[in-house]
Image (tube, rainbow, N blue to C red):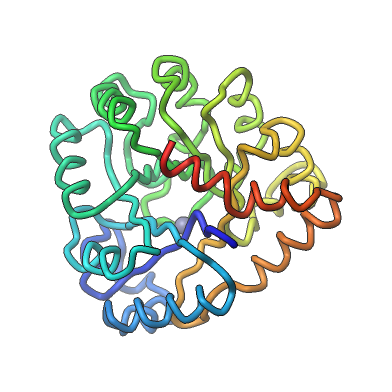
Amino acid sequence: MIIDAHAHMMTANMFKGVTGVKPRNVPQKMLESLQHSVEDNTKTWLEAMDRLDIEKTVFMSTVSLNDEFASFINSSSRFVGFARMNPTLPDAVDILKKELKLGMKGVKLYATSGEFNVGAKEAWPFYEYCEKNSIPITIHFGVTIGPTADLYLGNPIHISRVLSEFPDIRFSIAHFGAGFFREALMLKYKRENLYIESSGTNNWLLHQDNFLTLKDVFRKSIDVFGVQHILFGTDTRIFPDGYREHILKQQQDILKELKLNEGEIEDIMYNNANRFLSG
Ligand SMILES: [Zn+2]
């Protein structure tokens, strides 16, 4: 069994709520992907998940408090929703409470493109609430296609102090830090509840000043994070290209090449995500 810890679903209605996007910058494929209803998405996702033995998928919302996203998440017990949040807003806790009411089970912070600093003191009441209520948080640091991206805010080091102040929050760094792999590894120093997640094309590797391959990245993550703190994900948006099976296959092959035993592979593909989600 598999849990995909990072995927997306977006409708035209949701897309309207994404800030900073100029219509001329929207790729054709994205426009195509938005032509599908919530029902289309539910059906197509469940078909893919059945076929590939994926028990659950975690969906990262790209907008906040969206009814269509909520109705999608609530259309199957196999879908898990993460709310897009700005933790530094004065009413962040209230917004989060509303998101939880809509059925969200965790939070996604877009550090690089959210125009806030994840380490800012203004965000601490929000973290306090997450810690008390056992809400997991996934953060996208590093490079991103997001239109308002600012790499200055995308360094995982910003979360360093938060990790020590709120040691019980389960944090996950998406896409192996998307270019800030070194910083993600440093952050793990004596941090029990920090996870790293494998989703996406990992094309950030091209922009590194070293010659790491994805296999090296997995090997090093296993050394530093341990097999119990790595989450598998694909970053699939199912329309128009379908489930990213090539990423699933590539990562499964790497784990086998690294000679992990079955139990260790199951940790990365399934057990860790369960622990990350529910504590
Ligand atoms: Zn994503």
Number of marks in the rendered image? 0
Which residue occupies 29% across, 25% down? 132
Who's the residue at 39% across and 20% down the image? 166
Left or right, 176 with respect to 214, comes to left
Residue 192 vs 207, above or below: the answer is above
Q: Name the quadrant of the C terminus.
A: top left
Task: From the top left corner, tell me how far across and down residue 125 is, in percent.
Answer: 24, 23
Quarter that holds the N terminus: bottom right
Which quadrant of the figure has residue 89? top left
| Image location of residue 236, percent across then percent down | 50, 67
Query: In the figure, is residue 88 to the left or right of 267?
Result: left
Q: Is residue 164 above or below residue 8?
A: above
**36 or 232: nearer the viewer:** 232
Between 63 and 275, the one lying in front of the other is 275
Residue shown at the point (58%, 53%) measured from the top left: 270
**In this rendering, does residue 25 appear at all?**
yes
From this viewpoint, is residue 145 visible? no
Q: Position of residue 186 (x, y in %)?
A: 64, 25
Residue 105, image x, y percentages? 32, 47
Q: Residue at x 52, y 28 (%)?
A: 193
Q: Is residue 97 above or below residue 45?
A: above
